[in-house]
Amino acid sequence: MTDTPAHEDAVSRPAAQDWGDWRKQMARRITTLEQLRAWIDVTPEEEEAILRCKGRYRWSITQHYASLMDPHDPRCPIRLQAVPGLAELTPGPTATVDPVGDRVYRKTNRVIHKYPDRVVFLVTAVCPVYCRHCTRKFHTTDQQGTYFEEKEARSFEPDFAYIAAHPEIRDVLLTGGDPLVYPDEKIAFILENLRAIPHVEVIRIGSRFPVLMPDRITPELCRILEAHHPVWLNTHFNHPKEITPASAAACDRLLRHGVPVQNQSVLLKGVNDDIDTMRALVHGLLKIRVRPYYLYHCDDVVGVSHFMTSLEEGRAIMEQLTGFTTGFAVPQYVYTTDLGKIPASREVLHRDALGDVWVENYQGQKRNLGPVLR
Ligand SMILES: *Cc1c(COP(=O)(O)O)cnc(C)c1O
Ligand code: SF4
């Protein structure tokens, strides 16, 4: 540690035009303390966390995401999501590695089948940035952990065969890790194999690349996705700072190729757990034509639980959005369990003991609608 801010004498902080194509950007991710000092004043706490996470939790940060970090403020919402923190190493007493039971529902190396008509397909365990709050932290970030029973490199044939053998599966959600870490040819291979199964109607990709490394969303990739429609993409913006011209352009490329882009954010303490931030996020998303889909209550995951808010805090934010802004700016607030995702917003319509239906609107006005249909 020195008294001079480390970033001032740093050697390598290239400008965006020198980052290279997405493959180079993957290779040039920030993975050492020394590299990180080129971007931010690393605090003693961050330094200790990085040293103590060694051998336990991976970390890596793309140049694009690092460029969004406030070099002087350790409470910057981008830093909190990307730079290891000491709290990761002291999990809450009730935290587990897989509270939602993904591993229980795993049917093949890659297929998680929890809902009858749709599956999660774990393409990989690799991500461009290892988000500190990842709900699959055990799979992606934990150096000892993985949901894969066999090696990631294993053939995809058994996974395709499982889906082909289950005609009730009409929706396949490619995720990981981040499926778009793979080269275009591999993505085309996966999409072709899924499209060869007649009952697969919808393919979804869960990817944070539009936020973390927008240059990955190349015209070539978009053409591959377009050739296998309907393909939807769900991304993961958590804070309005993440909505940049580059991320907007990446979403625009997807949209122009007919890929609807939706957003799944996680309610994170210190990052986006206040109404002003959340309102700016959802309004910013509408401006780039990305529809807020889910707001996840943060799961009680080992190494993540320090990001949890209370359910009441989440509901209070939802109540300040619902009715006060555009209907489709409001995500569905959900709590994930081993039984699936459970809507977590406050109950605003109920039947009383006499059989009458009561509603309460966004301003708290109540009305008895009578027996409605019974
Ligand atoms: C979230 C999830 C899905 C998809 O759920 P939707 O509500 O359709 O977005 C499917 N399978 C598993 C295991 C999931 O966690
Ligand atoms: S990109 Fe998604 S899967 Fe990867 S670490 Fe972040 S939250 Fe987890």
Image (cartoon, grey):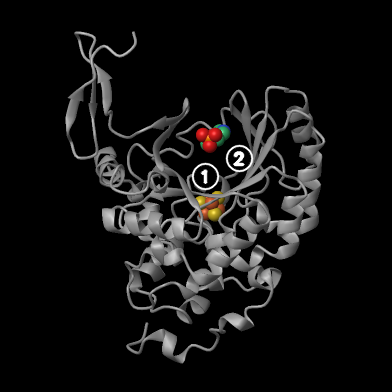
Q: Amino acid at mark 1?
A: Arg
The crowd level at tag 1 (other Cα within 10 Å; few <14, some 14-19, many 20+) is: many
Earlier-in-chain disc, 1 versus 2? 1
Classify residue 190 as left or right of residue 271.
Answer: right
Locate residue 132: give its quadrant: bottom left
Q: Residue at x 40, y 71 (%)?
A: 47
Locate residue 149: give its quadrant: top right
Q: Position of residue 117 (x, y in %)?
A: 62, 26
Classify residue 20 as left or right of residue 104.
Answer: right
Q: Residue at x 34, y 78 (%)?
A: 72
Of 194 and 289, which appears nearest the observer?
289
Residue for badge 2: 147
Q: Position of residue 30 (x, y in %)?
A: 55, 72
Tell me whether the residue at label 1 lies in contact with that at label 2, contact meaning CB atoms closer than 8 angstroms: yes
Q: Position of residue 288 (x, y in %)?
A: 50, 60
Figure quadrant of the N terminus: bottom left
Classify residue 41 as left or right of residue 184.
Answer: left
Which numbered tag is attached to residue 255? none
Of 79 and 238, which appears nearest the observer?
238
- The mark lying in front, picked from 1 and 2, is 1
User: Disc 1 beta carbon < 8 A from ligand 2?
Assistant: yes
Q: Residue at x 42, y 72 (%)?
A: 69
Indicate the secondary structure of the residue bearing disc 2. loop
The crowd level at tag 2 (other Cα within 10 Å; few <14, some 14-19, many 20+) is: many
Camera sees residue 60: no
In the image, ligand 1 is in what quadrant? top right
Residue for badge 1: 136
Q: Position of residue 57 (x, y in %)?
A: 50, 56
Of 355 and 128, which appears nearest the observer?
355
Q: Is residue 237 above or below residue 247?
A: above
